[in-house]
Amino acid sequence: MKVIALAGGVGGAKLAHGLSMVLPPDDLSIIVNTGDDFDFLGLYISPDLDTVCYTLADLANPTTGWGQVDESWITFNEISALKGPDWFRLGDKDLATHLIRTAQLIQGQKLSEITKKFCEIWGIKHTIFPMSDDPVRTMVHTKNGNILGFQEYFVHQECKPIVEHFEFRGIEAARPLPQVLDAINNCDIVIIAPSNPWVSIDPILEIPNYRDAISRKPVIAVSPLIGGKAIKGPAAKMYQELGIKPCSSAVANHYKDFLTGFIIDNLDHIELEKIERWRIIALVTDILMKKNQDRLRLAQEVLKFSETILNRSR
Ligand code: GDP
């Protein structure tokens, strides 16, 4: 079964990791959000791409959910001592990634080419694509009239501002990657990882042509909300501030136009009926991934559910 996974950072990386433990390299491609990318101290930083790559390479820091394991902070501490901006923490190993990627981008290499080379070096066998080689910047429009870059909102202001809407700056001009379109066209199923629908998955879907290509395939999604709460990050807070009750069915509703199947947590079994009324096939299981074993188990369940869905449509 050929699978495409759409992913943001934390939740996306966990399920992508589980899928990579089950599927052979040729059967899994992961398309990662780059709307969170930004420039910091002159460096090009791609937080979701790095989280997915570090996770699949077994380099990720399990405690923070970002950055590398066994980091040192020598450069960061000096930056801080020099009164440089220190609201975005960069470990020494992580810095090497940003330095080399930035240098290669300046030389004219594409983000997708650089990602491919880094993946080879890190021993990642499955394919990881940035959603585009062109810049897209997620901007958060807040209730008090400010427009914040995503990392300014997420890290510097700790998600405190109340969101009004999101803008994916540059999205109309962002070209889809031909390799991604080919991978979507040749896949059996698209899996939307339990990532933030507003700021991790929507930017991918809004790259020209992706939504259409994805809509022609069976699509299943895993809820990033359990019991009305996000495991990490502002997804539930965003739903609330946008005037929508945060719950699994709200996520299903978000993707309703093209969703074939949806996976929710046991805690949310009460929402099953509502979701099925939209003609979405639902599966209720344990969708919390605390350990590597949970990632593997959930990935196996997602793939079994995918097979059931594919068999039904045959
Ligand atoms: P970000 O770009 O780093 O915020 O990463 P994502 O958008 O991929 O991940 C954030 C989302 O992942 C949040 O809405 C979390 O609720 C969700 N998430 C994190 N861990 C888990 C988990 O173990 N299970 C599920 N179902 N969702 C999770």
Image (cartoon, helix red, strand yellow):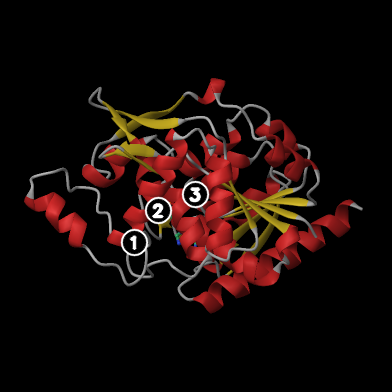
Q: Quadrant of residue 120?
A: bottom right
Q: Vertical placement of 244 versus 232: above or below? A: above
Residue 114 is situated, as x and y percent measured from the top left of the image, at: 53, 46
The earlier-in-sequence mark between 3 and 2 is 3
Circles 3, 2 touching at the beta carbon (< 8 Å): no
Q: Which residue is mark 2?
A: 97
* Residue farthest front in this picture: 107
User: Which label lies toward us, 3 or 1?
Assistant: 1
- Disc 1 C-beta below 8 A from ligand 1: no
Query: Mark 2 belongs to which amino acid?
Result: Thr
The earlier-in-sequence mark between 3 and 1 is 3
Drawn side of residue 146 relative to residue 18, left or right: left
Q: Tag on residue 93?
A: 1
Residue 90 is situated, as x and y percent measured from the top left of the image, at: 27, 54
- Disc 2 C-beta below 8 A from ligand 1: no
Circles 2, 1 touching at the beta carbon (< 8 Å): yes
